[in-house]
Structures are given as structure tokens and as C-alpha cells.
């Protein structure tokens, strides 16, 4: 049966962005939602975003680094920038026990009908490595068995293609070619960092064998106001408007 998957990542507790993306996906007849992690962290609505992803969408989800640290309160936040660390500390206070347990229990990788999900990389998902260039992607591809693998973490929509060598490009649409492997960063729903404040996600259509990158406007002003009301650092609100 033909499926249209919406692949969402780095939602980061931004409810307004998540709702806008779901509306866009439903208008394009998406049949399934999946998530490459970081449902929480940075913004003001962790509980609401968990309930939508887990209960309303029933979305298969892998664990991101923020999901991990927000649900492992004993772990020190030494690897985080002060801004991210303060948001994680805030999120730990907000999460209901069952929501924290759900985050903590998410797998690091997941296979779904011929494609793979991971937040960072398949070579060492627990190290949360960032993939910005061909070299980073090369070590990942050693472990990618499926034609398609979707990831997030850098908040930059990007495609790495493995033919003879690894090629990196910024896409709008991909037609899946035979004999090629694709490592696809969906960009971020809740905190885009490529200078475009609109939410980013992708749609994978199994009938046309295409991947489409989507950008969606959302109510940034409300998301910013909620961050300020919650007492989160001002820079976390400001960066939503800048898309950085
Ligand atoms: Zn993230």
C-alpha cells in the first residue's frame, strides 16, 4: 500500500510550529508521521508536544540528545551550551513522570518499512555527533543498510548522497535513484537554524519514490511570548524570529 510519511525532527517543545506542520502535512494527504527526535528542549510546551507526537500522531520516534538529557535528571549538562543547558534544566522541572519515562525509553535508532531513523548518526548514535560535511557522513554511511535514513540534530535541512563518493546538497525534491543511499536531514520543526524561521520537515511518498522538503509559516510571535512567560532565556525567543 502506498504511504506518504511526514518526517518531523527537532520539534523542541514548539507547539505553534508543530501544529502548523501537522496542518500542512494533513493538507498534503500524509498517511503516517514519524519523528527523528528532540521532541522537547528549548521552548515552552514540552508536555503538549509529547502528547501530540505520542498519543495523537502515534508517531514512531527516536531519542534525541535533548530528549535524553531532559529525562535523565542525574546526568550533568557539561556538553551543552549555557543556553541549551538552562532550557534542559527548565524542561526537567516541567515534565510529568510518565512523559519523562516515555522520552527515556525511546530507542536511539528505528527501522520502518525500508527506511531508518536516527537523531544523529548510525555509527555512534549515543555520541550525538553532528553531520555537517561529507567526512562526517562517510562514517555514518558505513552503518546505513537501507536506501533512506532520516536524521536531525543540526537543524539544517540537507541531503548526503552516497554514490561512489559522498555528495552534500540543499534540496527541494529528490527522486530516489537505484543504487544510491540517502542520509537526509529533515531540518527543524521548532527551531530552524538556516536563517529561514519557517518550520522545516520532509514528506516521503512511497508511490512516486520522492522526498519533498517543506517550509511552513507558523505563529512565531505566540511561541516567543510563551518562552518569555515561561522565564526561558530571552535569546531562545529571539532566535525563533531569526531562524538561527
Ligand atoms: Zn535539536
Image: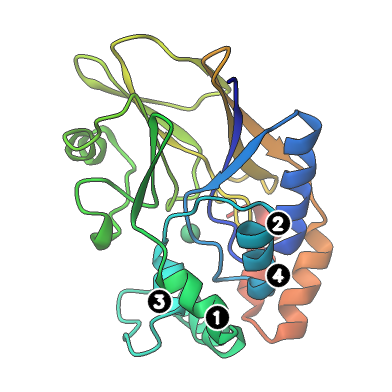
Residue 2 lies in quadrant: top right
Relative to 1, residue 65 above or below: below
Q: Is mark 1 on a helix, strand or loop?
A: helix
Q: Is mark 4 on a helix, strand or loop?
A: helix
Relative to 113, residue 209 above or below: above
Within-10-Å neighbours for mark 3: few <14, some 14–19, many 20+: many
Which residue position is annotated with label 1?
A: 98
- Residue 109: percent from left, percent from top: 34, 50
Relative to 167, residue 101 above or below: below
Q: Distance between the residues labelled 1 and 2?
A: 16 Å
Drawn side of residue 185 relative to residue 90, left or right: left
Which residue position is annotated with label 3?
A: 69
Q: Tell me: is circle 1 under 8 Å from ligand 1.
A: no
- Are the residues tagged 1 and 3 within 8 Å (C-beta)? no
Q: How far apart are marks 2 and 3 (CA)?
A: 24 Å
The residue lying furthest to the front in this view is: 1
Sequence-first tag of 2 and 4: 4
Q: Along the line of sight, which residue is nearer the eye, 38 or 80?
A: 38
Which residue position is annotated with label 4?
A: 48
Which residue position is annotated with label 2?
A: 56
- Are the residues tagged 4 and 1 within 8 Å (C-beta)? no
- Name the image quarter holding the C terminus: bottom right
Residue 90 lies in quadrant: bottom right
- Name the image quarter holding the N terminus: top right
Sequence-first tag of 1 and 3: 3
Sequence-first tag of 4 and 3: 4
Q: How far apart are marks 2 and 4 (CA)?
A: 10 Å
Q: Along the line of sight, which residue is nearer the eye, 80 or 201?
A: 201
Sequence-first tag of 4 and 1: 4
Indicate which label's residue lies in the foreground, 2 or 4.
2
Amino acid at each position: 500500500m502506498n504511504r506518504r510519511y511526514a518526517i518531523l525532527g527537532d520539534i523542541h517543545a514548539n507547539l505553534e510550529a508543530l501544529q502548523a506542520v501537522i496542518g500542512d502535512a494533513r493538507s498534503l494527504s500524509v498517511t503516517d508521521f514519524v519523528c527523528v527526535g528532540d521532541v522537547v528542549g528549548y521552548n515552552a510546551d514540552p508536555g503538549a508536544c509529547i502528547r501530540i507526537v505520542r498519543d495523537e500522531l502515534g508517531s514512531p520516534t527516536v531519542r534525541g540528545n535533548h530528549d535524553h538529557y531532559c529525562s535523565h535528571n542525574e546526568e550533568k549538562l557539561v556538553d551543552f551550551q549555557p543556553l541549551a543547558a538552562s532550557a534542559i534544566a527548565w524542561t526537567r522541572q516541567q515534565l510529568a513522570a510518565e512523559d519523562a519515562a516515555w522520552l527515556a525509553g525511546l530507542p536511539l535508532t528505528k527501522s520502518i518499512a525500508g527506511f531508518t531513523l536516527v537523531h544523529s548518526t548510525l555509527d555512534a548514535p549515543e555520541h550525538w555527533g553532528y553531520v555537517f560535511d561529507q567526512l562526517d557522513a562517510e562514517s555514518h554511511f558505513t552503518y546505513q543498510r537501507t536506501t533512506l535514513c532520516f536524521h536531525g540534530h543540526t537543524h539544517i535541512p540537507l541531503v548526503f548522497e552516497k554514490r561512489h563518493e559522498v555528495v552534500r546538497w540543499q534540496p527541494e525534491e529528490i527522486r530516489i535513484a537505484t543504487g544510491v543511499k540517502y542520509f537526509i536531514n529533515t531540518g527543524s520543526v521548532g527551531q530552524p537554524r538556516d536563517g529561514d524561521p519557517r518550520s522545516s520537515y520532509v514528506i516521503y511518498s512511497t508511490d512516486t519514490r520522492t522526498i519533498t522538503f517543506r517550509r511552513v509559516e507558523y505563529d512565531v510571535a505566540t511561541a516567543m511570548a510563551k518562552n518569555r512567560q515561561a522565564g526561558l532565556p530571552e535569546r531562545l525567543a529571539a532566535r525563533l524570529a531569526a531562524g538561527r
